Amino acid sequence: MSLARAKKTIVWDLDDTLNDLMGAWLGWYHQRNPTQRFVPFADLHENPPVRLLGVSEETYLASLDAFRLSIEGRSLSPVPAVIQWFEAQGFSYQHHVLTARPVATVSVAAEWVFAHFGRWVRHFHFVPARRTTENIPDQGEAKSDAIARLGGADFFIDDCPENINAARTVVRKCVLVPKPWNDGVGTIVDVLASLIAP
């Protein structure tokens, strides 16, 4: 009797990979700040977009975190193409979700992940994002360090080039999700097509 071959491991970023956080937040932000500079989502060539919006980083982060905790933020829909991929391919892999968020927003993130992806995802991890309002010893830890503690991964999918570059030593294949603020090419459908289980 032969042992079944181990499933390949995928580490998924949460925000702007499994959902479209920035686009939803930007619309929410503009509705609440109608006199502020308007920036279309397609023009978000910097992340964080503090210079584009003409606000401080503290103001931006406070708004982003408020959105994450809002009804609108908790009600974000998953990216349709990602859900379709999971329905077709999800059980062929072992899935980890790894997010960088302030501690105050992590519980709603975990609830969202398991509500939408609980059929497939068995592991949820976070690294504490830096916030002046939280005194956490490991704030700002790299996602690559968290992946290394997992023993590496076959795939890592993220929208942040810095996270992708740092993870190349512990991940077999890193995949950048195309967004206005990075140099990714193609679409999320192309990204998902690059994940092929033998």
Image: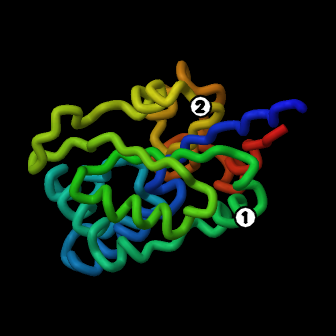
Q: Is residue 79 above or below residue 177?
A: below
The span from disc 1 to disc 2 (Cα, nearest Å) is 21 Å
Looking at the rendered structure, the kind of residue marked 1 is Glu
Q: Image point 65% across, 32% down: which residue? A: 154
Residue at mark 1? 87
Q: Which comes before the other along the chain, label 1 or label 2? A: 1
Q: Is residue 91 left or right of residue 123?
A: right
Q: Is residue 123 above or below residue 9?
A: below
Q: Image point 35% across, 68% down: which residue? A: 25
Instruction: Give the x, y percent position of residue 145.
Output: 40, 26
Instruction: Give the x, y percent position of residue 155.
Output: 63, 36
Q: Do we see residue 162 in this rendering?
A: no
Mark 1 and mark 2 residues within 8 Å of each other at the beta carbon = no
Image mark for residue 129: none
* The N terminus sits in image quarter: top right
Secondary-structure class at tag 1: helix
Secondary-structure class at tag 2: strand
Looking at the rendered structure, the kind of residue marked 2 is Ala
Instruction: Give the x, y percent position of residue 161.
Output: 48, 36
Q: Image point 50% across, 46% down: which residue? A: 159
**Residue closest to the eye, 111 or 36:** 111
Residue at mark 2? 153
Q: Is residue 47 above or below residue 27?
A: above
* The C terminus sits in image quarter: top right
Q: Do we see residue 39 in this rendering?
A: yes
